[in-house]
Amino acid sequence: MSDTPQNPFEQMLKQAQEMAKAMNPGLENFSPKGFEALWPTMPKEVMEMMFGNTVNKDGLDAKTRLLLTLAGLTCQGAQADAAIRQTVRHALEAGAKKQEIVEAIGQMSVFAGIPAMTRALELAQEAMGENKDEDQ
């Protein structure tokens, strides 16, 4: 058997990994999750100032906006792993309960389908696992 991948995408990935190793050996072990960890979770007050109802007093608060963002990311097929995890962390910081996050994602199963909902729930659980002391 050959060590060469049969799938063209696997071939491209293997070629990119070999190129990264040749150009910069440090890139060989690059982790997107490690890069994601560089972006801190904003404090609730900052989110309210930037995204909440500080400017528009009768508008949506940061928690509601983040739950809507999470629903939109789920409807797009839950393909933006880092964005979903980051939105979940920010929603928790803005006061969302874990149950509210699960319900926001679950509601999208009607529009995005069960696979997208399941993937978003897996990503949300990863992010919520980092915050074990939060409300259920």
Image: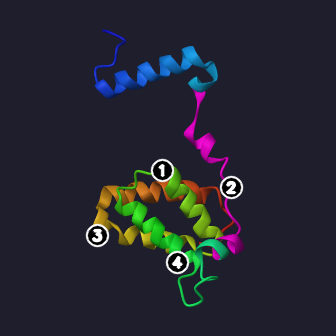
Q: Identify the residue position indicated by label 2 in the image.
A: 40
Highlighted magenta segment, given as a residue range: 29-48
Q: Nearer the viewer, mark 3 or mark 1?
A: 1
Q: Earlier in the sequence, mark 3 or mark 1?
A: 1
Would you identify the image quadrant in which residue 50 lies?
bottom right
For the residues labelled 4 and 3, the Cα–Cα distance comes to 20 Å
Q: What residue type is labelled 3?
A: Val
Q: Which amino acid does label 2 sit on?
A: Pro
Q: What residue type is labelled 4?
A: Thr
Secondary structure state at the residue bearing disc 1: helix
At horizontal 68% and vertical 64% (from top left) the residue drawn is: 42
- Residue 125's label in the rendered image is none
Label 3 close to label 1 by CB (< 8 Å): no
Q: Where is residue 56 in the image (x, y as percent from the top left)?
A: 58, 85
- In the rendered image, the quadrant that contains the C terminus is bottom right
Would you identify the image quadrant in which residue 8 lies?
top left
Q: Where is residue 34 in the image (x, y as percent from the top left)?
A: 63, 41
Q: Residues within 10 Å of mark 3 (few under 14, many from 20)?
A: few
Q: Which of marks 4 and 3 is nearer the N terminus?
A: 4
Q: Identify the residue position indicated by label 4 in the image.
A: 64
Question: Is residue 106 shown in magenta?
Answer: no
Question: Is residue 43 shown in magenta?
Answer: yes
At horizontal 37% and vertical 12% (from top left) the residue drawn is: 3
Q: Which of marks 1 and 2 is nearer the N terminus?
A: 2
Q: Identify the residue position indicated by label 3 in the image.
A: 110
Q: Earlier in the sequence, mark 4 or mark 2?
A: 2
